[in-house]
Image (tube, rainbow, N blue to C red):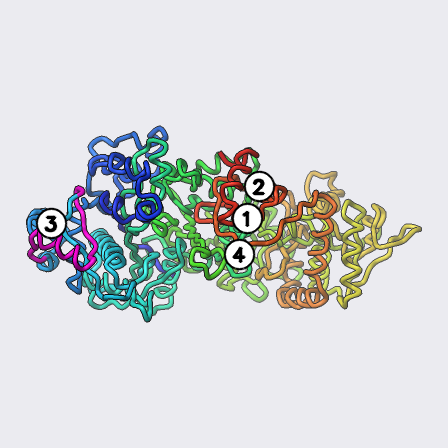
Amino acid sequence: MSGNAVVKGASYVLVHAPDFVINYGTTQTVERIVNPDSDYLKALNSSIRSYEQVLAYPPNQVYLGNLTPKDLEDFEFPWYDKQVADAKRFGKFGELMPEDEFIALMQICDAFDLVVLEENFVAKTKEKLTKHPLITESMLSKLKDGQSLEAIKEYISEYNAEPLYFEREIVGYVKRAHEIDVNLSAEVLLENLAYKASGVLALLHLINNSGIDREAVDYVIDCSEEACGDMNQRGGGNFAKAQAEMVGLINATGSDTRSFCAGPAHAIIEASALVKSGTFDNVVVFAGGAVAKLGMNGKDHVKKNIPILEDVMGGFAVLISKNDGVNPEINLDIVGRHTIGTGSSPQAVISSLVTDPLDRAGLRITDIDKFAAEMQNPDITKPAGAGDVPEANYKMIAALGVKRGELERADILNFVKNHGMKGWAPTQGHIPSGVPYLGFAREEILEGRIKKAMIIGKGSLFLGRMTNLFDGVSFVLQENSKEAQTEDLKVSVKEVIEPLIGIVAEDSELGKDNVLEAISLAENKGYRAILIEGEEAHKKMDEMLRRKEIDAAVTMNYSFPIGVSTVGRVITPGRGREMFIATTTGTSATDRAEAMVKNAIYGIIAAKASGVKEPTIGIANIDGARQAEKALRELQQKGYDIKFAESARKDGGVVMRGNDLLAGTADVMVMDSLTGNLMIKLFSAFTTGGSYESVGYGYGPGIGEGYDKIVLIVSRASGAPVIAGAIEYATQLVKNNCLKLAADEFAKANRSGLKQILDGLKERKTAATEEEVKPPAKEIVTVEIPGIEIMDIEDAAKTLWAEGIYAETGMGCTGPVVLVSEANEAKAIEILTKAGYIN
């Protein structure tokens, strides 16, 4: 079986917290300080929803698992005025706990007698909790007899304790643990105890949902945005063990992982690595809810006559275990990461988190059935000006797919619908960031409705004022691979000796017999090949390459990542010389001249790996040829060993005409992939009048910096001689250690300044094609302006520059943002609104 860890269970819980909204949410506490007589505070009480209204709210029923994300499509947007009939407190993932029971749970979770409750309140809530299916007698025993209301009010007044409210009445307090340490103040301890209690609730439901023996849990990871400690170590922790202790995970140790909204995704990757390495068998990743974020966008909601929608704390827990051959696995070979050097532009962020890991795995964007990034509820974010966050993320991914040629622009909305979802998670920071879908994804994969889901966590680090960097990681949850034994791969083996070439020809227009004839022709020359057949033949091919059961592969279609393209090999009709066409499929770069410079190096690698010791280079006379020539000559001057061919035409030069192509004047003919694709077809099929390809070696191997396998392409219309030629080509590449040769060649080119030369090409193009708008003097920018379409984000920043406002583009938790200083926020919003970038 695969060593990848699996997801064996998940839980999701909500806590109704209207009095916490009013008294402890930071939007409200700040408003009381700066504007105590505001209209917002006067309208706050009347904008609070009842427990029944919150329970029947469609997104909350999705979070608990009583509805699916797709069910949200049945409710007309907005949803705040819609109700789910017969809404239930308990769902398959968890529950919505009422506020009074939660306050009692806070005292149960209190290890230092910090929570004191009123006697009548204790009596009522204890009776309720005795009926709770997951609250044990041991837990109930921690609920202490209460004090009188008079004693409670007196203590609050005298010792600056933080009052606890239920239905707007005082029912207890949280006292401070130190007289001067702000980290142990009553306010901070109230937040931390509420966080602890909501995390404990999530753990209780996970244990119930997964059926795991409590003593079998080895390690726990808390991944919220909260911190506990004292004045000497303000975020020392350890929330994880504190909460695990409450639910009886006696054999577990653990730690806290933090990275703002991206924390849960980081933690799940860490947990999966711990399990895959064999360090632990069962790891739980979990988090409770954030008091501070309650009512965070309340002012915008009330202004638009919408009730306070951020009135619940959220929590979740996920069980990561060793592979059981059944549950969906977390593929650690497909992990996206925003590195320190990635940058903060939307394209850079999405590329690092989505397309880069997919490229490494040989996958396209459309190979992922569902993406889950920030699954924030648009009912909350749209009135606050942040737009529909999940939709914005899906549009960014789709836009990148269009740029990569994997989608048509007209397909963007269909992509959003088919590969995305409506958001349903509360805006609790770390809670929405990808993980709310894990429970549904696990079920959908087990039921065979999807095969792969990508979970994306993103976070804004500037909030801590330590760095302006963005953060993010991603991972793929996929169906259990049940890693097949070799005999399960339906392969037809003629003779197994090294090197061995695998053939996938499911799409052959000339049939299987043609392919078998090609293998026979290759064997007659001493080469060896096997035919890989059956369902998911390409997947089997990749598995065999990974396990080194074959040394190279020849196939009729394959998705290469951006930066990798194929070098074809033909026999020219003029003189019968072999010539390498660089390149024939794939995309070396999105800029033509840059791609052609890279193609020259790719061609040199293919030629040398085929036995041509000092290949000569010619550049086809197409658009971009002169730019490519100039860059390549500069590379030569800086030390890269490149030999230019001379055109057979009278005026000579490295730029080649049609005559040179027919004669094979150069060993390597450089062109863009579209032209190369046309040329390879002409050279391969001219003897048959174009009915099928009969001459040459096919479209050739995918080559690119860092690409680590040998996969060659042939046309579906390839006759047996061309497929046999491709087997020969592949064998030579293996014998001559093409991958090492490629690494060495790229190293030589880079030492000679390849990257700087390519950057110069881009700069020249930019200077020639764009009207220059210079930014004003740089200043510290900390205010995010969201809600701008991904395709417009750079233009929006330049619009502000033109008005004298310094701005940067970046990726916030809610999607692409423009960053400005606090002083310029209002003016920038006004300008962008007037220009039509935001509503």
Residue 360, disc? 4
Residue visible at 28% across and 51% down in the picture: 291
The residue that mark 2 highlights is: 796
Inspect this view and state whether residue 68 appears. Answer: no
Question: Marks 1 and 2, Cα distance to the nearest angstrom?
Answer: 9 Å
Near mark 2 (Cα within 10 A), the count class, few <14, some 14-19 or many ≥20, is many
Viewer-side label of 3, 1 = 1
The residue that mark 1 highlights is: 809
Q: What is the three-letter code of the residue carrying label 1? A: Thr
Q: How far across and how far down the image is residue 836, in percent?
A: 55, 33
User: Left or right: where does residue 767 sit relative to residue 72?
Assistant: right
Q: What is the three-letter code of the residue carrying label 2? A: Ala
Viewer-side label of 4, 3 = 3
Question: Marks 3 and 1, Cα distance to the nearest angstrom?
Answer: 50 Å
Of the image marks 1 and 2, the number of the one nearer the N terminus: 2
Q: What stretch is highlighted in magenta?
A: 144-168
Query: Element under label 2?
Result: helix
The residue that mark 3 highlights is: 129
Viewer-side label of 2, 3 = 2
* Residue at the extreme bottom of the image, as rendered: 232
